[in-house]
Image (cartoon, helix red, strand yellow):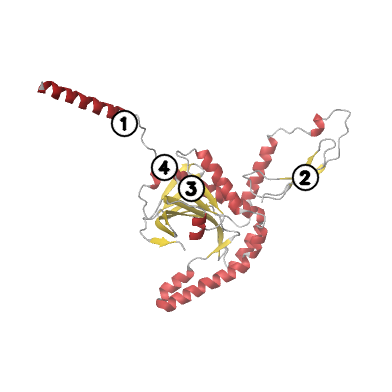
């Protein structure tokens, strides 16, 4: 009798274990959480970057005196550059860098079909403690904060588009917000201008102005195109595997496609496109691309569709808006015949490294 009871208990135990195992196999493994990304778009106009000349002087002199001298040198460089950069800013008054960056990144993240798709928030102001609490922000682990910037160096030798990428953990508890920084990275695409012997910052700034707003805007479009490709590449499985490989001091070439050849360094990803300071290669390339697209697009005129007995109204001059991804350029005049009895349309408006993780914790005030 005892043997039968023991055998029955063993069978029940076996069946129980089998049932649990079967149920466990029906539960799919949890996938990776979607990447959380914040894009801070807060730069209203072309900025000035200062090469650390003052830092070199400070290191040579040493002590507090060296630091004061170095700071004064950098401050003077910024003040002088602000005066010279005014004409460049005027030439770019119709170029909206923040909008163009957001458009490009949105489109590329969607086209990349990342799995899982990242959760991306575009911010037009820096959020401090009060703003985070008011926005009902939630804690984030491994939050990627992207801060785009477009700038000219104070010596006017290099134009660049740069994105500072910061990975951090954010905790919120009551009225306290803390951010622990884990890694810093950057994506840079720059245009160094060919040097001319005896040419100083004043002459070099005039060379940029002579290139014109259309050419400079086309250069920024190229820079945005390149750095957003770098960002999206690093979000793919191939990019993450490549980035995880140790980087030497010399860096290494990253070439996901033949027309995308970047340099991976300990500070991030970078690439350059030297210019001669006279040719307008980027705006001319874009103009040729637009002309080719028009030549291959069939156009049906309103006059051809109108009945024979219907008189055709006089042509109306309109301004065609650039395509979504085209650089902002001067309006293109076209002759569009309006439908009968239709009012003339108003001109369309121009469109507006991976370094080691840090353990420091800071409090957002």
Expressed as whole percent of the image width and height from the top left, the position of residue 171 reads 41, 55
User: For the residues carrying marks 4 and 1, which lies nearer the camera in this image?
Assistant: 1
Tag 2 secondary structure: strand
In this rendering, position of residue 340 left or right of residue 66: right
Which disc number belongs to residue 24?
Answer: 1
Q: Residues within 10 Å of mark 3 (few under 14, many from 20)?
A: many
Who is closer to the viewer here, 228 or 248? 228
Q: Earlier in the sequence, mark 1 or mark 3?
A: 1
Q: What residue would you read off at disc 3?
A: 231
Q: Residue furthest bottom?
A: 65
Q: Residue at x 43, y 58 (%)?
A: 174
Residue 129 visible (yes or no): yes
Please name the residue that numbered disc 2 is placed on: 318
Q: Is the residue marked by circle 1 packed among few (<14), some (14-19), or many (20+) residues within 10 Å? A: few
- Of the numbered discs 2 and 4, the one sitting upstream in the chain is 4
Frontmost residue, 136 versus 37: 136
Closer to the camera in the image, 4 or 234: 4
For residue 33, which numbered disc appears in the image?
Answer: 4
Q: Is residue 191 visible?
A: no
């Amino acid at each position: 009798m005892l043997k039968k009871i023991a055998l029955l208990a063993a069978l029940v135990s076996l069946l129980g274990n089998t049932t649990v195992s079967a149920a466990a196999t029906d539960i799919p493994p949890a996938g990776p959480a979607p990447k959380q990304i914040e894009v801070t778009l807060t730069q209203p106009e072309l900025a000035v970057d200062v090469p650390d000349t003052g830092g070199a002087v400070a290191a040579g002199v040493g002590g507090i005196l060296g630091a004061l001298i170095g700071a004064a040198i950098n401050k003077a460089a910024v003040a002088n550059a602000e005066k010279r950069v005014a004409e460049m800013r005027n030439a770019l008054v119709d170029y909206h860098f923040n909008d163009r960056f957001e458009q490009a990144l949105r489109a590329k993240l969607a086209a990349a079909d990342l799995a899982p798709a990242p959760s991306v928030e575009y911010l037009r102001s820096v959020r401090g403690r009060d703003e985070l609490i008011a926005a009902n922000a939630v804690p984030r682990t491994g939050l990627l904060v992207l801060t785009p910037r477009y700038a000219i160096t104070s010596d006017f030798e290099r134009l660049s588009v740069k994105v500072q990428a910061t990975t951090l953990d954010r905790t919120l508890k009551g009225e306290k917000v803390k951010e622990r920084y884990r890694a810093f990275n950057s994506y840079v695409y720059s245009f160094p201008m060919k040097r001319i012997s005896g040419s100083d910052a004043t002459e070099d700034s005039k060379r940029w102005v002579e290139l014109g707003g259309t050419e400079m805007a086309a250069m920024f479009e190229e820079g945005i195109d390149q750095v957003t490709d770098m960002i999206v590449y690093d979000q793919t499985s191939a990019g993450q595997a490549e980035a995880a490989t140790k980087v030497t001091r010399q860096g290494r070439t990253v070439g996901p496609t033949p027309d995308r050849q970047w340099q991976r360094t300990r500070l991030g990803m970078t690439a350059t496109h030297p210019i001669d300071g006279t040719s307008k290669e980027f705006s001319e390339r874009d103009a040729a691309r637009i002309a080719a697209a028009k030549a291959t697009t069939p156009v049906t005129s309103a006059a051809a569709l109108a009945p024979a007995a219907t008189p055709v109204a006089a042509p109306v001059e309109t301004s065609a808006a650039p395509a979504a991804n085209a650089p902002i350029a001067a309006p293109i005049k076209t002759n569009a015949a309006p439908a009968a009895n239709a009012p003339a349309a108003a001109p369309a408006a121009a469109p507006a490294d991976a370094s080691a993780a840090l353990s420091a914790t800071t409090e957002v005030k």
